[in-house]
Image (cartoon, rainbow, N blue to C red):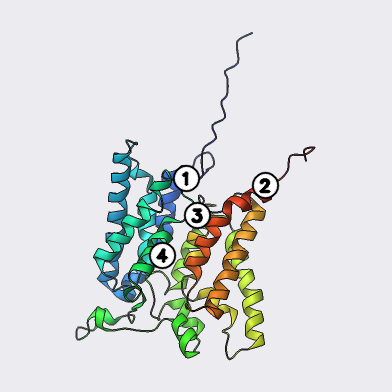
Amino acid sequence: MPEQPTKNLLVSPSPHFREGEDVPQIMRSVIYALIPAMIAGVVFFGPRALALIATCVTFCLITEYAFQKIRGKEIQLNDYSAAVAGVLLALTLPPSFPLWAAALGSVVAMGLGKNVFGGLGFNIFNPALIGRAFLQAAFPVTITTWTEPFAWMEPAKHLDSVTAATPLSLMKFDGKFEALPNLLIGNTGGSLGETCSIALLLGALYLLKKNIIQWRVPLAIYLTILVFGGGLWIYDPQQFPPPTFHMFAGGMVLGAFFMATDMVTSPITPTGHWIFGIGIALLSLIIRSFGGLPEGVMYSILFMNCCVPIINTYTIPHIYGRK
C-alpha cells in the first residue's frame, strides 16, 4: 500500500483568507471600494485632494520598502497593504493639509504603526489611525482647519484661505445639527473621506458583497448609536443630535466599514466582533457628546484595538468536553 503524503497545517498571523483569495487581492478590493470616496474628494476639493492622496500613498510605499530592506526581509510592496494605509490616511486629513506633513504622517503610520511590530499581520493598531493620531498631536491647528466644498472652482479664492466648520464642530460649539442630505451627499466641510457618506457606503457594500469585511462590527456600531444616541436625543433634543447625525457625520462611516473591520486589528470571533463594535460606538458617543473634542472615532478604534487580545481570549469557544 503506497504511503500517504503528509499534510502539514500552516498557522500564520491574520489576515486569513479562503481558497482563491490572497492578500494582494483583498487589498486591491479595498482600494477599489475606496475609489468612489476618492473621486468625491477630488470633486469637492479639487486637484489638491489628489495630490494629498498621492503623497500619502507614495511615502507609505517608500517607508514600507525602507523597513523591509533594512530588516533584510522580502520586499512585498505588491501586497498593496501600504497603498491601502496611504489612501486611508489621506482620507482622514483636511484637503488643505500640508503635503510635507502628510508625508511625515505616512512615515509614522508605516514605521511606528506597522513595521516596528513586525509587519503585516503583527501590528496591533490600525496604521492609518496611528499616523492620524500623530498628526493630530503634532499639528492640532492645521489638522482642524477645514475647507469649503467647491472653493477650488472659484479663481478668486485660494483653497487654504477658505475655511469652513465641520458638522461635528457646529454641533459641539454652536449647537447646530447639519441636515442629513448634506451629510449623505458631502456638501459640508471635513476631511477628504468624511464628507460624502454615499460614496463610502457604495464601497462598503462592494466589500460586504465580496465578503472582504465582516458585517458584525459595523452593525454593532450602528445599532449601538441607534439605541444610545437615540436615547440621548429623546432625553434632550436641543443638546443632543438625532442618531442619524452620529451615523453619517465625521469619520463614522469610514471608521465603521474600512478601519474597524481591519482583519489584523479586529477580533477573530463573532462575539468579539459585537463587543468590539459596541465599544467603538459607546466611546465615540461619549467623546462627541461629553468630551472636549468634537470627534472621537479615531481614538475609539485605537482604544478598542488595545482590547482585541483580551476580547479574543474570553470569546474563543471552548472545546467540547474541556473546562
**Distance of mark 4 from mark 2, alpha carbons?**
31 Å
Q: Which residue is mark 3?
A: 262
User: Which numbered disc, 1 or 2, marks the residue that appears first in the sequence?
Assistant: 1
Please tell me in which quadrant of the rendered image residue 281 appears: bottom right
> Which badge, 4 or 2, comes first in the chain's sequence?
4
Amino acid type at image mark 3: Asp
Q: Amino acid at mark 4?
A: Ala
Q: Tell me, for residue 133, which label it has, or none.
A: 4
Q: Which residue is mark 2?
A: 316
Left/right placement of residue 60 relative to residue 304 reads: left
**What is the C-alpha distance between the residues marked 1 and 3?**
12 Å
Q: Residues within 10 Å of mark 4 (few under 14, many from 20)?
A: some
| Residue name at image x 38 percent, y 68 percent | 137
Q: Amino acid at mark 1?
A: Phe
Q: Which residue is mark 1?
A: 122
Q: From the viewer's perspective, is residue 257 above or below residue 240?
A: above
Of mark 4 and mark 3, the one earlier in the sequence is 4
Mark 3, Cα crowd under 10 Å, few <14 / some 14-19 / many 20+, is some
* Residue in the picture at 63% in, 82% down: 232
Q: Nearer the viewer, mark 4 or mark 2?
A: 4
Q: Is residue 124 left or right of residue 135?
A: right
Where does the image place residue 126, in percent across and percent down from the top left?
46, 56
Q: Position of residue 169 (x, y in %)?
A: 44, 82
First in sequence, mark 1 or 3: give its number.
Answer: 1
Write down the quadrant of residue 9 in the picture: top right
Secondary structure at badge 1 equals loop
> What separation in Å lies between label 4 and label 3 (alpha carbons)?
17 Å
Q: Secondary structure at mark 4?
A: helix
Q: Residues within 10 Å of mark 1 (few under 14, many from 20)?
A: some
